[in-house]
Image (cartoon, rainbow, N blue to C red):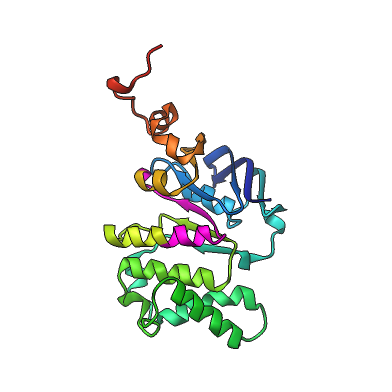
Amino acid sequence: MNAVELRGVSFAYDERTVVEDVSLTVEEGGFHALVGPNGGGKTTVLKLASGRLKPDSGSAELFGVPSAEFTDGARIGYIGQDPPEVAGRMPISVREVVRLGRVPAAGLRRLGRGDAEAVADAIDTVGLQGMERRRIGSLSGGQRQRAYIARALAGEPDLLVLDEPTVGVDVEAQEEFYDLLDDLNENGVTVLMVEHDLEVVAERADTLTCVNGRVYYDGAASEFVDSDEFYEAYGSRRPPSEEVEP
């Protein structure tokens, strides 16, 4: 079964078409990246793929179920971009942030001992043990993103959806962050991620879709930067030394 499947999806904000006829598939257990120029519709596709937006046309499925009918939100952990000025004002602790991740799994019942154990396990998994009482706004960018991953993991998701998770994070913390994602993926968590760093994508992701209003490339992540579609999508010419002889 595929975790995500979009077929011929289009979407417009008001009357402005953002993406048109976009198709992509994310296999369960895969690590899939979405890339493309700024303003090309990556975040919109990510939201369509995770069920946060409904397509104007085409079809979107999550784990084989039409996204409009998908009700098991606990299976999806969504981690959006982190505006530092907002995070810095949040008067809640790391544990409280991670605890929010249990709400979809708990439903209407009160959180209990099992939920507390899931929260503690998630915090341990991302390496934030000992920081449970610190305010989320006091953390570094890398630590804060770990806390948000822990929040998602507390719900025991099958799919992690991340929107440019390392913006504002220093290089060393980025490496640690992606090592964590690799570990989670190796343990069965499907990853779908928007990322601007193509070198990271080539090293970490299995498959890749390049979007700039439409799909320019869909295939192996390691082959994208050497493809003609890369230059076409980003509006540049292949350097003369790299042009293919006719």
Which of the pair 147/80 is nearer the observer?
147
| Whole-percent x, y for residue 116 in the image | 54, 84
| Residue 48 position in % (x across, y down) | 58, 51
Quarter-wise, where is residue 65 in the image?
A: bottom right
Q: Residue at x 45, y 76 (%)?
A: 123
Q: Is residue 55 visible?
A: no
Q: Is residue 187 magenta?
A: yes
Give x and y (percent) for residue 215.
Answer: 52, 36
Q: Name the residue at 33% across, 59% down.
A: 174
Who's the residue at 47% across and 57% down the image? Answer: 162
Q: Is residue 93 magenta?
A: no
The magenta stretch is 180-198
Give the vertical position of 230 relative to 63 (above or below): above
Q: How many marks?
A: 0
Q: Quadrant of the C terminus?
A: top left
Residue occupying the point 34% across, 20% down: 243
Q: Is residue 95 above or below residue 228?
A: below
Q: Give how far across and how far down residue 39 sits, in percent.
A: 41, 43
Front-lying residue, 19 or 17: 19
Q: Is residue 242 visible from the viewing direction of this image? A: yes
